[in-house]
Image (cartoon, grey):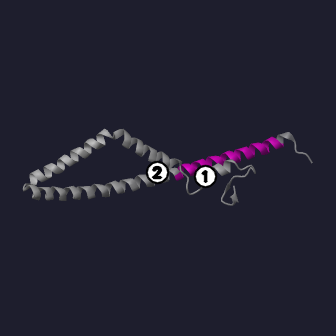
Amino acid sequence: MEKDPGQLFRELKDDITAYAEVKFELFKLSAYERFGKVAGLLSYGLVLMFLAFFALLFIFLSAGFFLGDLFGSLGIGFGCVAVLYLIIIALVFFNKKRIQDKVLNEVIDALTTNEENGNDTKKQEADTAGETTIGEAPL
């Protein structure tokens, strides 16, 4: 019993439509996962910077009091600390491009790595059976 060509093309169109919908859903889920990774990385970085800021603040405050006691004047001690801050600001200013490149590379790395899945999306694209699977369940 042969199917007519119109029926075959309708079935083929339905299969292609279903495949495109599944691929689009996979793309959306992959984008959500990568966005979540980047958001997690950025929030971790913000918390780390916040804690580092306060650690450095207290370190430099104690250094200011120590140097003030050492030199016999709090003004001179905190002046030395201010000079250290200016040196750090100059280092950051002159290494702006290197810092930007490092941050950009970290974000790109977070977007492109897929360590949890072991690059399952490439495996799915190479699947010749015609079924897209997530885990063991075909879609």
Q: Which residue is mark 2?
A: 38
Q: Earlier along the polypeptide chain: callout 2 or callout 1?
A: 2
Secondary structure, mark 1, is loop
Q: Is residue 101 above or below residue 48?
A: above
Q: Position of residue 36 (x, y in %)?
A: 49, 53
**What label sits on residue 1 in the rendered view?**
none
The residue under label 1 is: 119
- Per the picture, the main secondary structure of the magenta-coloured stretch is helix
Q: Nearer the viewer, residue 39 or 104?
A: 104
Amino acid tagged 1: Asn
Local secondary structure at mark 2: helix
Counting labels gives: 2
Span shown in magenta: 7-33
Residue at the image point whose x is 87% and y is 42% from the top: 4
| 6, 67: nearer the viewer | 67
Residue 9 lies in magenta, yes or no?
Answer: yes
Q: What amino acid type is highlighted by mark number 2?
A: Val
